[in-house]
Image (cartoon, coloured by chain):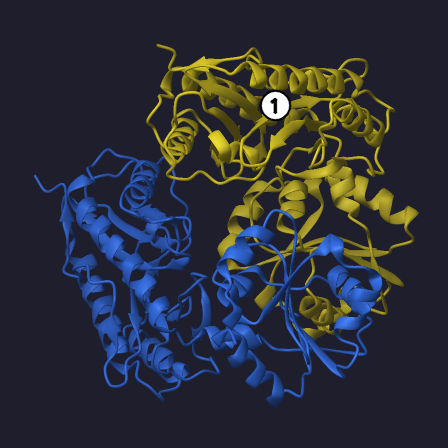
Chain colours: A blue, B yellow
Amino acid sequence: MNDKIRCIREKMKLLNLQGLIISNPVNIRYILGLDVEGTILITDKENIFITDARYIEEVNEFLTINDEFVIYDAKDLSDVDNYYFFQDCENVGFEEYYVTFSNYENMIRKYRIKSFEETDKIVEKIRMIKDEEEIKNIEKACKITDKCFNYLINYIKIGMTEREIAFEIEKFFIENGADSLAFETIVASGENSSKPHARPTDKVIRYGDPITIDFGAKVNGYSSDMTRTVFAGCILDEIRELYNLVLKVQQKSIKCMKEGIPCKTVARDAENELYIYNYSLIHALGHGVGLDVHELPIISHNSKFSFKENMVVTSEPGIYIPGKYGIRIEDTLRIGRLEPEVLTKSSKEIIIVDKK
Amino acid sequence: MNDKIRCIREKMKLLNLQGLIISNPVNIRYILGLDVEGTILITDKENIFITDARYIEEVNEFLTINDEFVIYDAKDLSDVDNYYFFQDCENVGFEEYYVTFSNYENMIRKYRIKSFEETDKIVEKIRMIKDEEEIKNIEKACKITDKCFNYLINYIKIGMTEREIAFEIEKFFIENGADSLAFETIVASGENSSKPHARPTDKVIRYGDPITIDFGAKVNGYSSDMTRTVFAGCILDEIRELYNLVLKVQQKSIKCMKEGIPCKTVARDAENELYIYNYSLIHALGHGVGLDVHELPIISHNSKFSFKENMVVTSEPGIYIPGKYGIRIEDTLRIGRLEPEVLTKSSKEIIIVDKK
């Protein structure tokens, strides 16, 4: 049977679920290894993928007999076929964080479900631990990101706009083998860098600006996520101090990310470290990275998860001085059996671009 | 009061709703005119926008006293404050096509809602009719799209890949004043053009290929949507016939899009026209265009809507011969009082690119 389905079936037993409906397209991509539209039904008898004419051929070609999946075209299924799928299932699970209220009602009606149960991210929790192939894809995405950063160091000049730089990143990714951006790139310069989620604007890079670049590539569906803050022409002493503090907190947090350590412990330590200097961390310290650029586990002071081998996560502390500037440094890393392995390897030294 | 809220309040009366919760970010963008995260509560007493620290300043600066909105930072609201909002509302509406089951349950708990009612796209239906400013933005997006098409006619050469062309479109849009792409561009050449939703691949444009380009720009949040099929080097006679048939059906359908005519009538006429020649229309004839590139009304054989002045919609018939090629022609147009006004004005003559 498909490895991922086997794993989901084990969790289903623990939750006393005889059936499960998977609607979230990212979870479907995870299970099938294919980017196709449809719904997965796991019943007491079969693994089923219901799709439409556009995808039938591709799915049939891709899946093997070992996947043990039965594929249907939705339009070939009668009401009676649909009633039949879960007829012997007492409890059927659904994705309450993805399914809209309208779809929830439709599914109960369509499949005549007796007891429809919330599953609290059953698949997303399995997705936290990456297998070999997933890690390979993330590594590739991280490599392209590093290569792009090396290129940017020489590319960025005073007088360019944030949008120009963001666009150049996308171009570089596409030309260097990425599928696409993993997320909308942040290029935030000068006072814009004080907003953690700033979008690239037509603001021009000025002498003395810090430039926060938060970017990532997608390879075979898997993301990288890296942030570097570089400086245009020069760096002010007060900012240099800030930079070194953020870097110290980031490096320390990475060292603490080890099998068995609760995520909240590492997040709280980083928060405390900044607090000593009168700064507060206004966002989570980090998050899981995979098919979604933000996925479980969240690494924040109230996270319920602990680090486990082959989780891939970020550490991204930042300091933001409203209306003035901000500094953030972020890496993507794999939790190892002993030490974490940092997958984004770009320099974290203070980098001055367009130095005359 | 904010015009859009006034309109929504009128509809609420008809539905016997004393309160409404708006969660869909596109609907919030529509009402406030701003791209910010949060939730709108319409109660029997007030219009409320609940957001967070990131947006408070921007929202307060942008909205005027005439909007009659009360702005809250979510973290300043106690449980009691939340209970209070809908305390005198018998029926409160929510967006059942947007709200997840998990959020549905949270809202009932948080706001102590007595009777939580489905609203069947109450805001999306109002969004079907565009005001002057919305039309201006769509017109701008259509102009950039036309300009880009003119550029592409000379740019596209045999030997380029679909991805290269798609990327050039994005670059052109950004450099010519668009916010972004309205949607992921389709560039589908040769046999790929037989798939209506093909994504750009590394396939190279060959002599004789039809190239279907389905693309649109976003300006101030509003989209354009246009498709042209051009030909690399030459056009086969059998394809020329097909092209002329699609064009005839498209032009006829546009003429029929008039105030008061049911959308399904126009869609069925187009389907029948193709059917006479043994082709079937395998997707809807068209759709509304606005803040979403696909919005109400859907123009298909079972649409429940009729055309009304200042709807902005597409007409996009296509013929697809599996494994061989496809032709689609699409325009964005505004329904007028008498005649529709086509907003994308690019030539629909047969265009041969890279003609030696």
Rendered location of residue A70, percent (x, y): 63, 66
| Residue at left offset 86%, top offset 56% | B18
| Relative to B41, A299 lies left or right | left
Residue A189 position within the rendered picture, expressed as x and y whole percent measured from the top left: 30, 46
- Residue A241, quarter of picture: bottom left
Amino acid carrying mark 1 in the image: Ile
Check the residue under mark 1 and report the chain it is in.
B
Front-most of residues B210 and B133 = B210
Image quadrant of residue B300?
top right
Q: Nearer the viewer, residue B36 or A312?
A: A312
Residue at image mark 1: B329
- State the image coordinates of residue B78 (x, y, percent, origin top left): 65, 72
Task: Give whichever of A241, B338 is nearer the camera.
Answer: B338
**Residue in front for this viewpoint, B320 or A280:** B320
Q: Is residue A296 left or right of residue A259?
A: right
Q: Residue furthest left?
A: A356
Q: Measuring 86% from the left and 29% from the top, which residue is drawn there?
A: B262
Instruction: Say which quadrant the C terminus of chain A sits in.
Output: top left
Q: Residue at x 69, y 37 (%)?
A: B283
Give the residue at x 39% y 25%. B206
Whole-percent x, y for residue B239 in the image: 57, 19
Quadrant hosting residue A174: top left
- In the figure, B245 relative to B275: above or below? above
Q: Is residue A219 found left or right of B85 in the rendered image?
A: left
B207 up-or-down from A248: above or below: above
Query: Crowding near pointer 1: few (<14 within 10 Å), some, many (20+)?
Result: many
Q: Is residue B96 visible?
A: no
Q: Please indicate, yes or no, whether residue A105 appears anywhere in the rendered image.
A: yes
A51 vs A108, left or right, is: left
